[in-house]
Amino acid sequence: MSDIAKRVILTIPMYPDMELAAAKTASVLAELMDFGEGEVEEIQLAIIETCINAFEHSKSDDQEIHIEFLLMADELQFKVTDRGVGISPDTLDGSRVLGSPGMHTDLRKRGRGLQIIRSLMDEVDIESSPNGTTVSVKKKKRG
Amino acid sequence: MNKFDIQIREDGEHAVIETAGYLNDALGEQLAEKAKELIGNGYTQLVINLEKTTLINSIGISILIEIIEALHEQEGALNFCGLSATQERTFRMMALAKYAGIFPDEESAIANL
């Protein structure tokens, strides 16, 4: 892999399981960059959660997600953009989602996607406006 | 497209549910239905074998939480096995490991119910 970033663009419709198309692409690119097996799985899960957040919250008219991958020398970046109505960081973080009504309040059922993404990736940035949302993610190569 | 499957193995006081495919809302709902059916039939000691489940999203995890809660209401127990390192890390982060055991293989998951 040279020092010059390579760019891969993908547009997926908001259909059930289409997040797997993004995950498959991410997997191929991460393997091309010699990420380890565990890191490839982390990247797949992160992009799945990013796409699902867009599916659930964007309310976009075009029902599409635009994904840009940047393959750098030492890291993989991806940006997931929708043209929806925008979303507050609180909603994405799940901080307004109540705990399960049962006995275990730490077992919150929904709204944990962003927490998963942040735990698996090195950097996560969210830009949102009434015209749409972009989630930018970076994963650095280890060793 | 996502191909998934659920296998059930009932053995005395416990039952094992083995899933294959992408554990999302679709597979998760089927899994929850099977688990509730088993609980309804008196199986309160369950193992969920995820060895053939390559990816689990947060909706799938939320459904696993529902199964944990349903079992705890019956004073039952649930152990997971066959998780990848990333899946185990995610389960621990989302507190599932506080209420369900995580074991490397089915044999140890059953032995520790």
Image: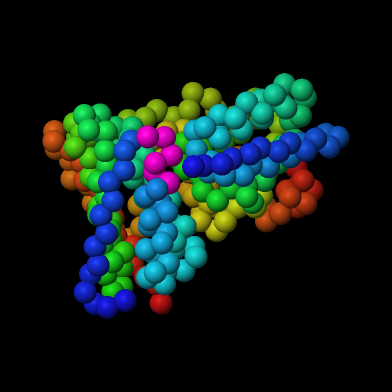
x and y, in percent, of residue A92 in the image: 30, 38
Which of these two is toward me, A72 or B39?
A72
Q: Write the residue at 67% across / 56% down.
A: B104
Which of these two is toward me, A1 or B44?
A1
x and y, in percent, of residue A45 in the image: 43, 50
Q: Can residue A97 be seen in this view?
A: yes
Where the C terminus of chain B falls, by quadrant? top right
Magenta part mainly helix, strand or loop?
A: loop
Q: Is residue B24 above or below residue A41?
A: above
Q: Write the residue at 33% across / 35% down.
A: A14
Q: Can residue A94 be seen in this view?
A: no
Instruction: List the single residue furthest toward the right.
Output: B12
Q: Does the magenta stretch include residue A19?
A: yes
Position of residue B68 in the picture relative to residue A96 (left or right): right
Position of residue B57 in the picture relative to residue A139 (left or right): right
Instruction: List the single residue furthest toward the top.
Output: B40
Position of residue B49 in the picture relative to residue A10 (left or right): right
The magenta span reads: A15-20
x and y, in percent, of residue B63 in the image: 53, 33
Position of residue A32 in the picture relative to residue B70 (left or right): left
Residue B73 placement: quadrant:
top right
Q: Write the residue at 53% across / 25% down.
A: A102
Q: In this view, does A133 lie above or below A97?
A: below
x and y, in percent, of residue B82 in the image: 65, 52
Q: Does the magenta stretch include residue A48?
A: no
